[in-house]
Image (cartoon, helix red, strand yellow):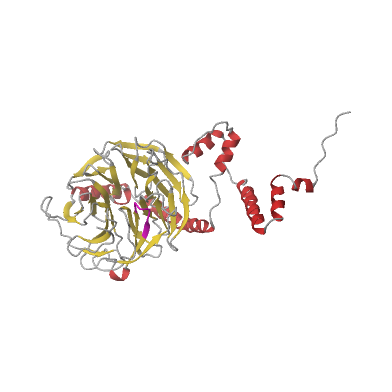
Amino acid sequence: MGSRPPPIPSAAAAFAGGAYASLAAAAATSPAARGRLAAALSARAAAAHIPLPGPDADVRAALRDRGHPVCLFGEDPYDRRERLREYYTPGPPALHTLRLSLLLPTLRRAAARAGAAAAATPAAAAAAEEAALAATRGLALRATVHASLRPLSAIALLPSPPGGDGGGGWDGGVDAAVAVGSWGGDVCLWRLPAATRPIAGAPPDYLHAARVTGLSAGTTASGSGLVATAAADGGVALHRLDDNAGRCRFGSSTPLPSAADPPVAGAVDVALHPAGAVVAATAGPAGVSLYDLSRGVLVATLPGCHVPLGAGGGSGARKVAWHPDGSLSATVGDDGAVRLADARSGRVVLSFPAAHAGASTAIAWSPSGVALASGGADHAVRVWDVRSRQAVVALPAHDGVVSSLRWGGGAAGDVLWSASVDRAVKAWGAARGWALLRGLTTHGDRVLGMDAGRGWLVAACYDKTWAAWGAEEGVGEGGVADVAMEGLQVNGNP
């Protein structure tokens, strides 16, 4: 006769063993301890339903994308998969609501972009390309402005207000306006084309204690003008433009909470979502922080986007840019990688692990949403096709670190502008075999920020000046006098 099977334990015996024993012990101690253990068991049950990659190779790739070791000593595939599960955690209700709010606007923008591309004829595309190339070659220096007591670090063209004179919405003959940030933490608005004096300074109720490292201008979902700034002290702030004053001054400023309290690393860059619902800020080793603009609260932090390098930890993620539809975010960082994440799910959908030798320092989407340009410490500019997931071209563009990239030339993105610490700003023809169209070397020191749009090109320099090139004839390079800082109102420290 064979041995009898062991008896099946009773429910009471099962309850007395394992985690249930801890729960039973907690029931006899305090309701608070029982609640904590019950929450832990609920979280464990929810984690068991999280879909994870099946093949071990995919699990290793997911761990590598998040900057974690692909294998630990004595770890088998099951342990490795369970370790990956720890990084998939349920998000807060605010994040779920925000991602749902991004769904329809991004789909509408994608449909409009696809419709415009389908309606474009070859003749119209060729005419637009010729116009873009002619405008690029016809840019003339309009102003060189001494803007601050400290070196300049960021610059951005402001969105035009609705209505007003001159077709662009500005009053008083103003074609455009720019926001300029410096190493002193100040942010100031300037007029174009005159650039003879600043419009106004940011209100003094919020001060960056360190240099402004990121600056982004756009509009909210309701159409109000907005400027977002990031600083090396970890601060991120929103500055609303006063629409009643033609967006010629700031209306209010709101500091946003940091991903860490106190901030462990300075914010590096900031980008407003095209739909005006969210702002993303790179927070160095802390990852990318997402803020809900309607409430000004931090809703999520996406850690592990980039691996910090060096003994000091590096800065991890450096730059962030939104797809024109707002569906994808692109980041670059110290590890030289370019990573694309779905804004509606938060998952990394595409990665170029070795985009640059050294750190990747600049990123920009083309207006068509098909191409993505990146620049790095290897002095190169690379253009990527996100459909084929391959590099289109690698340009030996500069003799120094690429600091900024912007696309121009209308909806097709026929021109790519690049700026570098080698003091040069260059234009490349996307439809002309990436030939060099223009090379501007007006600055006497490193170019740290640049923006292009609405017929203007602006660049901020370490020598405390910024320059503007416009479509109309200027006085020529070398004939523009620096503007004194008399009456300058700023937000920051000298």
* Quadrant of the snapshot with the C terminus: bottom left
Q: Is residue 425 visible?
A: yes
Residue 221 in the image, given as x and y percentages of width and height:
41, 62
**Is the N terminus in the top left, top right, bottom left or bottom right quadrant?**
top right
Left or right: where does residue 45 sit relative to residue 68? right
* Relative image position of residue 339 (x, y in whole percent): 42, 43
Numbered label tally: 0
Quarter residue 200 falls in: bottom left
Relative to 314, is 258 above or below?
below
Residue 327 in view (yes/no): no
Q: Which residues are magenta?
A: 231-237
Task: Examine the structure image and report whether residue 390 is included in the region drawn in magenta.
Answer: no
Residue lying farthest to the top in this orientation: 1
| Residue nearer the viewer, 427 or 254 | 254
Q: Which residue is farthest left? A: 479
Residue placed most toward the observer, 248 or 289: 289
Q: Is residue 233 magenta?
A: yes
Q: Residue at x 67, y 57 (%)?
A: 30
Q: Position of residue 25 (x, y in %)?
A: 71, 51
Which of 252/160 is in front? 252
Estimate the x, y position of residue 479 in percent, counting from the top left. 10, 53
Q: Does residue 351 lie above or below 3 as drawn?
A: below
Q: Farthest residue in the front direction?
A: 29
